[in-house]
Image: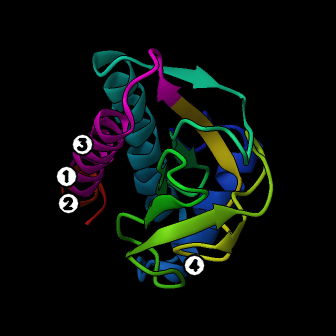
Amino acid sequence: MSAFDGLGTVIQGHIRQIAKTSGLEDGQESLEKLAEAWTMKRAAFEAAMRERGLEEIPFFGADEERGALALTYSGSIVTIGPLDGGKRRCEYASVGLRADVPESATEPESALSADVETDGPIAFSRGPVKSTSPVFKIAVAAERLPLDEETALLTQVAGDVAEDFARVNRTVVL
């Protein structure tokens, strides 16, 4: 079975979309490279979760005090900072390959416009982007942490994962 055929249909659809906007040659070889990269990125995200004491949850309320880290089906990383005075610092990173979205964007005074759950987009009333592709995984700190420690943890994990994703892009896709 090919790497592409081994993925679920939703992820295959996102990979087809990414292939169209990535500048890669049209065809099965590009889909296979992107599928292999997706599989490696998912593993990197899951490893970072385990190593840094994050736990996976299926739902994150817009009014939750804590922050979260999300991986979208299209391979973007979204950092949703903990609530601080009614606002959140949120960061979006597409981690390359997509020409139809910003590579990265940050909004220090973000607000979610809806709850976040797997298989749905992250929507912002004010944020680094208006909305994202559907969420594949949501991770939160397993323990309650002070605001500054939780912010630092989520930022560090997102940065580490983004570096891993960029390395995958350079070695597998490009």
Residue 20's tag is 4
* Residue under pointer 2: 170
Crowding near the residue tagged with mark 3, few <14, some 14–19, many ≥20 C-alpha atoms within 10 Å: few
Which image quadrant for residue 16?
bottom right
Identify residue type, mark 2: Arg
Pair 3/2: label in front: 3
**Element type where label 3 sits in the image:** helix
Q: Nearer the viewer, residue 64 or 130?
A: 64
Q: CA distance from mark 3 to mark 1?
A: 17 Å
* Residue under pointer 3: 156
Identify residue type, mark 3: Gln
Judge whether 97 appears above or below 43 on screen: below
Pair 3/4: label in front: 3
Q: Nearer the viewer, residue 37 or 82?
A: 82
Magenta range is: 140-166
Residue 85 point in image, percent of width and height? 54, 56
Looking at the image, residue 5 sits to the left or right of residue 174; the answer is right
Tag 3 near tag 2, CB within 8 Å = no
Pair 4/1: label in front: 1
Looking at the image, residue 23 sits to the left or right of residue 10; the answer is left
* Residue under pointer 1: 167
Query: Image quadrant for the C terminus?
Result: bottom left
Residue 120 point in image, percent of width and height? 78, 50
Question: What's the residue at 54%, 84% (across, down)?
Answer: 100
Residue 159 point in image, percent of width and height? 25, 50
Q: CA distance from mark 1 to mark 2?
A: 5 Å
Decide which of tag 4 and tag 2 comes sooner along the chain: 4
